[in-house]
Image: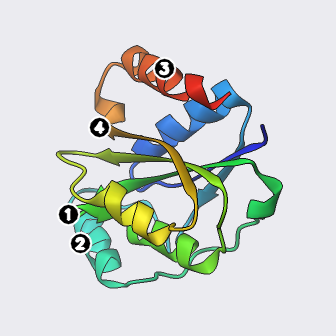
Amino acid sequence: MKTAVVFYTLDGNCAIVAQEIKSILNADLIQLHTDNEKKRKGIVKFFWACGMMFKKKPKLKPYSFDPSAYDLIIIGAPVWAGAPASPIKTFIANTSITSKKIALFVCHAGGSGNSIKIFKTMLSGNEFIAEIEFKDPSKNNIEEIKQQIADWVKGFK
């Protein structure tokens, strides 16, 4: 099954998950970047992310993705204020994804809120085969995270 992992990450948590999924499934990896992305730390990162939340569709750097080339599309995003990060919303709004098998993952620091429900609403017209959330992958035992991912993707093959 031809698989793509499309994700956005601000501080690397979703990248950890996406890279592991790619490794296990031999999937294509599409990382999204905002057009003004810079390394941000501390309070600056917080204010930048808050600003992005209020931009319904922040501009993304160019990327190449054709959903018709894939049988399964795995989409991942950080959770910002209980919803998927706004850059992933831009991707979904700009990409026609219908009648596909979809798996979703989110990374958060304290709760997934309504992020999965919002994802599913934005991606209506698809078949959702799996969903999972990860709390601070970069701050937890990486071997446990890898095992959790491996167990999650077993049903995808």
First in sequence: mark 4 vs mark 1: 1
- Secondary structure beneath label 3: helix
Whether residue 69 is visible: yes
Q: Which mark is residue 136?
A: 4
Give the residue number, with chain letter if any, for mark 2: 47
Give the residue number, with chain letter if any, for mark 3: 151
Q: Position of residue 6 (x, y in %)?
A: 60, 54
Q: Which mark is residue 34?
A: none
Give the residue number, with chain letter if any, for mark 1: 43
Is residue 7 shown above or below 15? below
Q: Position of residue 61 (x, y in %)?
A: 63, 74
Q: Position of residue 57 (x, y in %)?
A: 46, 82
Mark 2 to mark 1 CA distance (whole Å) = 6 Å
Which one is closest to the eye, mark 4 or mark 3? 3
Is residue 110 shown above or below 116? above
Q: Are marks 2 and 1 in contact (CB under 8 Å)?
A: yes
> How many residues crowd mark 2 within 10 Å: few (<14), some (14–19), many (20+)?
few
Q: Nearer the viewer, residue 22 or 138?
A: 22
Residue type at numbered disc 2 = Phe
Residue type at numbered disc 1 = Ile
In the image, what residue occupies the spot 51% across and 76% down? Answer: 90
Which one is closest to the eye, mark 4 or mark 2? 4
